[in-house]
């Protein structure tokens, strides 16, 4: 069972289009990794590079230290699960699952044993003589998973495996998939654009943008310590403020935000940030606290005054839009049982210190940095 | 048990070895080489011959001591006749074809499937049988004349009959093509134009037609080339006139090789430049459509007028295409037991089965030859065509070669088949490589050339529509390239391959022009029909024609079944 290492891997299509750009990361044995990112970010290309269906232009992929560029997909011992299933329409479920063992030249008795065992694993033994056209999406994907496992693959490559499934069935399917992967001690690389799916299922998440790996770390890291503006933006929802570091104290820094009015914000120090640096402050939308503006209010640190523009109920959540006095509009996510604000009422928005993330200003503009296309 | 497992394992390993890149590329080079030598080499060789013998050939044609340039003048006349006919046929086909194709593509009505099938019927009639049928209908006292109580045929053999014959056999191809083209235009876009207030005619003129422009032009090219290259029907309809393909046959029969070569080259060059030009030009030039006449177009879009128009078009279709194409069947019924002269002596039954010259036996021989040739041609062309199509769609490493190959594949489509047949004879026969003398194998070689595009083009289409992720699934599940092709791609393309095979088969069964040049003493059924008509055994000719129509019709039905699966 391998440890897979990407070493300076780039895939360049003709006129200088870098589908993936200088990837360097390691997938450890038995890990469940999700690759997340906007469409066109290179996540599927990464998966196809792993499968051998395409070859890197530069760099190499090492499996337990051995480069695999020249190994064809049929010799790689991987299982590729397709978004649109790619279940062979001219073969029934049984024959689809038996395909791998057959083309690997196994003995007839072994083929039967393996096929039946894997049909049982995904719960399709009753439907083994059905043809693909009479199966629903979930059963098709179950066939797809049984089919790759029957080849004996220890590494699963899942290309949006739930992308074509109904919303309601996805959660159940996630559980099934995770159970199988952990039970068989497989390594799985799962491409998805659904962040909650990624959060729910993976040991680590890799966020990609424009062919580059922005961050690869555990789901909780994204919540509490995103390393890049883009990953803070892409996983969950955040509001961002641009500003300049004006004071640098022993435990806190003071940042002056850009706006009609200057306000300061205090937060923990960060070794990479120096006085005078231009920075971006990110706050996750559910971490803002909001309360009616008290009478005779004296300005406090990390508090802003504003007026409610709208307060809408969105099912489990409530989304409150507040126009801050210094000229910014905030979107705040609250639980739906919290206090309801009338349009136009004055409020105080509090930012808890531990919710504040400070990033260095990007070289491109903040809008470009946050762009997801 | 273990030995069977062992054999299987060895076979898979064998496929794995064959799947290696160098071996695969070697195989692909062989496929391209075969395409080159079977399909492209004959016309190229013909060109080379003309160039090397330029002086002696031109002397024969332009400066003959006795005939002066009369040979050239008669060639010029035949070429001019061919082009005139092709041009008019193209215009009639498009004018009649567009309304019919539009109705078939856009409206649902009772009996649509039946009409759709009726339109396709003439496709099943081989051109020499169809030519004979048209001759009977328009040109003999037993045809239309009988119903309007005229003594003789309405038209005598010559340009008018040629025109009617060519419309009859090319029309179905054009409608089929146009229907596909119109279906590809998104109906929602037409609906958008309707909701914006445009009457149906304006919608067609300003929206559908410009969007389907290239397809319509391709349809026109199809009509033109089909007419230009046709030999079998023309032979029966031309009388004393000669179209260019017929003249090639005449030259060949008189063993006037240089003249035949020269005329073939002229036809090949004109066809290719014309088509190349039209294709280039078609992309750049828009159809005239900027002005809209709302009042006028609304009036002629009115339901009543539209219905009248469709009625007239349908009537013309019946009169020009369907009835003439199938008339031979009624004729055969008429002359089955009592012949045209009113006696049993020239009835179809007597002539074919009882007469002393034993036509039934020679007909059987011709039929066997036809089927043999068609079968061999189909098998060879599919085994060359499938890898070629796969290569063109799925092998990026051929790069620029693919563009060249892709164009080269269509070349036999535009060359009149008698010119192709002559080129094949000149290359392989006793004047060229001396490998094969006229007869069944030379027929096979000739048929290989013009059926090649018919087997490759649809295959390219099927492979392009094949979802490549099935192939990728096969590979990632551990199957080698070749194993994946055998276990996944091939079974999934089965329908496409079968319908491609039947198309190739019917094309080969129906061909006359090239066969006439290369057949030696062998006879195929279409040629046999021409022979019978020329010896004025009309009843037996009708019998042979109906036999051929029947076989082709069955094959056409099979194609329709294969192409339109009834499952969900």
Image (cartoon, helix red, strand yellow):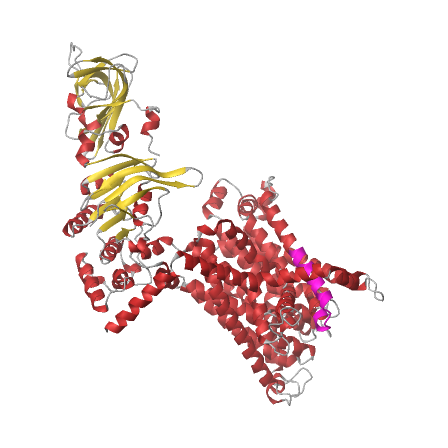
Would you say B246 lies left or right of B523 here?
Answer: right
Would you say A55 lies left or right of B238 here?
Answer: left
> Which residue: 26% across, 32% down?
A231
Q: Quadrant of residue A91?
A: bottom left
Name above or below for residue A192 compared with residue B64.
Answer: above
Give A317 or A262, whichever is nearer the viewer: A262
Would you say B32 lies left or right of A43 here?
Answer: right
Q: Which residues are magenta?
A: B251-271
Name above or below for residue B334 compared with residue B251.
Answer: below
- Can residue A68 be seen? yes
Is residue B277 highlighted in magenta?
Answer: no
- Can residue B100 be seen? no
Give B446 or A55, whichever is nearer the viewer: A55
> Which residue: 22% across, 40% down?
A198
Give A372 or A100, whichever is nearer the viewer: A100
Question: What residue occupies the far front of the structure in this picture?
Answer: A66
Picture quarter with the C terminus of chain A: top left
The spot of residue B7 in percent (x, y) is 30, 70
Name above or below for residue B505 compared with residue B287.
Answer: below
């Amino acid at each position: 069972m391998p440890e897979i290492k990407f070493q300076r891997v780039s895939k360049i299509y003709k006129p200088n289009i870098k589908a993936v750009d200088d990837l360097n990361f390691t997938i450890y044995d038995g890990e469940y990794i999700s690759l997340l990112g906007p469409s066109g970010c290179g996540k599927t290309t990464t998966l196809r590079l792993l499968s051998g269906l395409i070859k890197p232009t530069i760099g190499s992929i090492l499996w337990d230290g051995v480069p695999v560029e020249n190994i064809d997909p049929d010799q790689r011992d991987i299982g590729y699960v397709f978004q649109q299933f790619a279940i062979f329409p001219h073969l029934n479920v049984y024959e689809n699952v038996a395909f791998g063992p057959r083309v690997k030249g196994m003995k007839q008795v072994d083929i039967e044993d393996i096929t039946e065992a894997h049909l049982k694993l995904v719960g399709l033994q009753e439907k083994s003589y059905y043809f693909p056209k009479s199966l629903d999406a979930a059963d098709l994907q179950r066939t797809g998973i049984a089919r790759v496992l029957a080849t004996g693959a220890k590494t699963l490559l899942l290309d949006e495996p739930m992308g074509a499934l109904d919303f309601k069935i996805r959660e159940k399917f996630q559980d099934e998939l995770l159970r199988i992967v952990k039970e068989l001690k497989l390594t799985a690389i799962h491409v998805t654009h659904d962040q909650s799916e990624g959060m729910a299922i993976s040991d680590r998440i890799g966020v990609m943008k424009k062919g580059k790996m922005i961050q690869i770390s555990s789901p909780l890291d994204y919540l509490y310590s995103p390393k890049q503006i883009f990953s803070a933006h892409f996983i969950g929802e955040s509001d961002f403020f641009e500003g300049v570091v004006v004071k640098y104290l022993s435990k806190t820094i003071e940042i002056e935000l850009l706006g009609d009015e200057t306000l300061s914000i205090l937060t923990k120090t960060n070794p990479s940030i120096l006085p005078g640096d231009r920075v971006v402050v990110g706050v996750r939308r559910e971490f803002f606290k909001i309360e009616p503006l008290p009478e005779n209010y004296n300005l406090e640190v990390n508090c802003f005054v504003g007026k409610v523009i709208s307060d809408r109920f969105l099912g489990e959540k409530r989304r409150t839009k507040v126009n801050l006095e210094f000229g910014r509009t905030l979107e705040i996510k609250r639980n739906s049982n919290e206090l309801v604000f009338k349009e136009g009422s004055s409020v105080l928005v509090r930012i808890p210190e531990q919710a504040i993330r400070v990033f260095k200003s990007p070289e491109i503009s903040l809008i470009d940095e946050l762009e997801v296309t | 048990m273990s030995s069977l497992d062992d054999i299987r394992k060895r076979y898979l390993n064998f496929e794995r070895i064959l799947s290696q890149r160098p071996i695969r590329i070697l195989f692909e080079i062989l496929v391209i080489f075969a395409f080159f030598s079977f399909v492209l080499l004959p016309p190229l060789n013909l060109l080379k011959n003309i160039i090397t013998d330029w002086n002696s050939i031109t002397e024969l044609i332009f400066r003959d001591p006795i005939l002066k340039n009369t040979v050239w003048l008669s060639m010029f006349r035949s070429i001019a006749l061919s082009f005139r006919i092709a041009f008019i046929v193209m215009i009639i086909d498009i004018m009649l074809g567009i309304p019919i194709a539009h109705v078939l593509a856009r409206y649902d009505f009772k009996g649509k499937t039946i009409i759709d099938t009726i339109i396709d019927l003439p496709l099943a009639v081989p051109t020499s049988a169809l030519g004979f049928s048209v001759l009977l209908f328009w040109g003999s006292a037993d045809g239309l004349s009988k119903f309007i109580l005229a003594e003789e045929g309405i038209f005598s053999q010559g340009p008018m009959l040629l025109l009617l014959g060519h419309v009859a056999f090319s029309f179905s191809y054009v409608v089929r093509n146009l229907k596909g083209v119109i279906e590809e235009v998104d109906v929602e876009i037409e609906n958008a134009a309707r909701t914006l207030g445009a009457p149906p005619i304006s919608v067609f003129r300003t929206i559908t037609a410009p969007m389907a422009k290239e397809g319509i032009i391709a349809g026109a090219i199809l009509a033109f080339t089909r007419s230009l290259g046709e030999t079998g029907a023309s032979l029966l309809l031309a009388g004393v006139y000669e179209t260019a393909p017929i003249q090639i046959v005449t030259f060949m029969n008189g063993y006037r090789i240089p003249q035949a070569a020269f005329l073939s080259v002229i036809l090949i060059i004109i066809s290719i430049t014309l088509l190349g030009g039209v294709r280039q030009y078609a992309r750049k030039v828009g159809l005239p459509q900027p002005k809209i006449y709302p009042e006028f177009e609304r009036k002629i879009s009115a339901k009543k007028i539209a219905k009248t128009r469709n009625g007239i078009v349908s009537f013309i279709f019946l009169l020009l295409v369907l009835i003439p194409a199938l008339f031979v069947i009624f004729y055969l019924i008429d002359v089955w037991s009592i012949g045209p002269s009113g006696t049993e002596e020239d009835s179809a039954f007597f002539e074919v089965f009882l007469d002393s010259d034993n036509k039934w036996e020679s007909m059987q021989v011709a039929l066997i030859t036809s089927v043999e040739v068609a079968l061999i041609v189909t098998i060879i062309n599919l085994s060359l065509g499938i890898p070629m199509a796969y290569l063109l769609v799925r092998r990026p490493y051929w790069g620029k070669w693919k563009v060249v190959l892709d164009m080269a594949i269509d070349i036999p489509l535009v060359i009149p088949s008698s010119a192709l047949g002559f080129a094949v004879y000149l290359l392989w026969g006793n004047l060229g490589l001396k490998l094969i003398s006229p007869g069944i194998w030379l027929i096979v070689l000739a048929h290989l050339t013009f059926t090649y595009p018919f087997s490759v083009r649809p295959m390219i289409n099927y492979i392009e529509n094949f979802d490549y992720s099935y192939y990728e699934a096969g590979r990632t599940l551990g199957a080698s390239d070749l194993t994946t092709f055998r276990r996944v791609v091939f079974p999934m393309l089965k329908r496409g391959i079968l319908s491609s095979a039947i198309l190739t088969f019917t094309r080969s069964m129906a061909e006359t022009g090239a066969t006439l040049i290369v057949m030696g003493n062998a006879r195929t059924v279409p040629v046999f029909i021409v022979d019978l008509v020329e010896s004025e055994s009309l009843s037996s000719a009708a019998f042979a024609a109906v036999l051929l129509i029947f076989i082709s019709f069955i094959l056409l039905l099979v194609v329709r079944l294969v192409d339109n699966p009834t499952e969900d």
